Amino acid sequence: MINLLLGIVFLLILVLPITVKRVEHNIELFLLAVGALTVSLSSLFGPERLWDLQLIETALIEPVRITAATLVFGLLFRLFRDPLTWSIVAAERAIGPRVFAFLLILILGLLSSIITAIIAALVLCEIVSSLNLDKKYETRLVILACFSIGMGAALTPVGEPLSTIAIAKLRGGPFDTDFFFLLRLLAVYILPGLVAVSLAGAFLRGREVKAGHGLVEDRPEPVSGIFRRSLLVYVFVAALVLLGAGFKPLIDTYISRLSAGVLYWVNMSSAVLDNATLAAAELGPQMNVVQVKSILLGIIISGGMLIPGNIPNIIAASKLRISSRSWAELGVPSGLILMVLYFLVLSW
């Protein structure tokens, strides 16, 4: 009974944000409500009572670190955005577009685990808006940079909600889920991927155009927007904590029994679904390390394929007005190549 109910709720989480605009635009509040619903259903019909002070405390405390990082780095970026942008554009002219593209993609990927994926995406939008290169080249540069940001941000729990919720969901099992757990687990896979994506960006070629003919950011972000975004990040992560707890019966019965290879390819759905939501619904402390790696890498890599796949994609596409079709033309084949390569590495 409980698994049937949770299965229906899971399908609603997958379908409603894609089909209902009001849900899409208020996804944080929607997930918070559904998270509370899943915990209540699992407590009423499941084998154990999940609503307790520990769960409430976790839901309140777990989002604090990433929320604080988002707020602090957001305010710092707004304060120093002009000199930072001028310096980077000057560097691009000095070292040339190929080396610049390589370093931009690589550095943003590495820094995203510290300054958060959100701030890294905003920095990317500022830099690209300042370049006078053709729109097609800049679009490709943005897509590859978002692959890099999404991959790098997964290495620490302040990088993005996916990594925050992964730490929370795996706590209490056989893993040492400290701040550097994901770095120890995934760095050997992620770092070569960052270099590969950066090299792909370096081989692109753009041509000079008149100002305004490339990608241009829609508008500067006000201070109120920084505080609002930080609050939404808090609500989002709190919702994911509840979702993860509520889906525990479903994880124990079905997901934890799937093979690592199946889990890896199933998570290619992260291309169209929020990656942190998938992590909340799938990860559990009873899983072995191969299953955890397969889930996380499948989610992380495929998240760059389409705009809804992760936070930096959504921010960059919205602010730079990149269409879904333009994103898919490069994002899908690039993601499929990476998925196959990582699958071969995991299977070796």
Image (cartoon, helix red, strand yellow):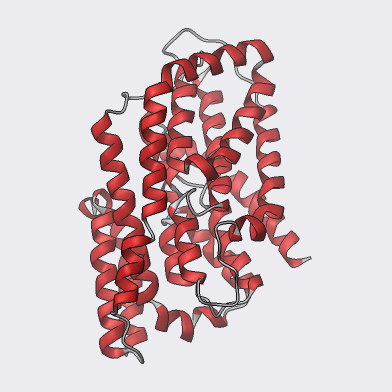
State the image coordinates of residue 160 (x, y, percent, origin top left).
46, 50
The residue at the point 37 percent across, 75 percent down is 245
In the picture, residue 195 is in which quadrant?
Answer: top right
Q: Position of residue 210 (x, y in %)?
A: 47, 7
Q: Which residue shows up at 54% across the image and 67% down it?
A: 266
Q: Is residue 85 left or right of residue 18?
A: right
Total marks placed: 0
Rendered image quadrant of residue 258: bottom right
* Relative vertical location of residue 44 with respect to residue 97 in this rendering, above or below: below
> The C terminus appears in which quarter of the rendering?
bottom right
- State whether residue 275 appears in this view: no
The residue nearer to you, when weighing 175 against 308, is: 175
Q: Does 230 sit above or below residue 135? A: below
State the quadrant of the N terminus.
bottom left
Looking at this view, name the residue that lies furthest to the top.
Answer: 210
Establish if 227 lies above or below 217: below
The answer to which image quadrant residue 34 occupies is: bottom left
| Residue 20 visible (yes or no) | yes
Tell me if residue 78 comes above or below residue 152 in the rendering: above
> What residue lies at 63% left-to-right and 26% top-to-bottom?
101
Residue 30 in the image: state x and y as whole percent.
24, 60
Q: Which residue lies furthest to the right in this view?
A: 348
- Residue drawn 61% across the image and 44% down it: 334
Picture coordinates of residue 275, whole percent (x, y): 46, 57
Residue lying furthest left in this view? 22
